[in-house]
Image (cartoon, helix red, strand yellow):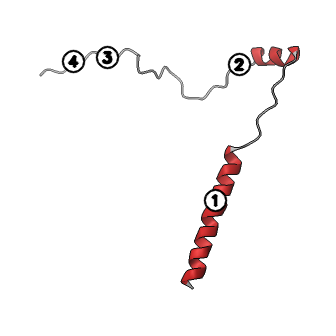
Amino acid sequence: MRKNFALFLVALVALTLVVAAYGCGGSKPAENTGAEGTATEQTQAPADTGMGGMHDSTAAMPADTTKK
């Protein structure tokens, strides 16, 4: 019983790894070298990630107003 359970767990982990590898190695879009391919790439706006605002470590931080 323990041996069957261990084999089942190994098979489950292997299947999980296969699915993960298949998902990460998805097909990449074909690169267009023609004039029409570059025109469409230039006119498309970047996708909005919905994060909004400026998230940069160089952004100005408010002054510390606490007394020491």
Q: CA distance from mark 3 to mark 2?
A: 33 Å
Look at the image and tell me in which quarter the N terminus lies. bottom right
Alpha carbon separation for disc pair 4 and 2? 41 Å
Disc 1: which residue: 16
Q: Determine which quarter of the picture holds residue 9.
A: bottom right
Determine the secondary structure under disc 4. Answer: loop
Q: Which residue is mark 2?
A: 45
Residue type at the position of mark 3? Pro
Q: Residue at x 60, y 63 (%)?
A: 13
Amino acid type indicated by mark 4: Thr
Q: Position of residue 41 (x, y in %)?
A: 77, 19
Label 3 belongs to which residue?
62
Disc 3 vs disc 2: Cβ atoms closer than 8 Å?
no
Instruction: Report the amino acid beneath label 2.
Output: Ala
| Residue, disc 4 | 65
Amino acid type indicated by mark 1: Thr
**Callout 2: SS:** loop
Q: Residues within 10 Å of mark 4 (few under 14, many from 20)?
A: few
Q: Is residue 4 left or right of residue 67?
A: right
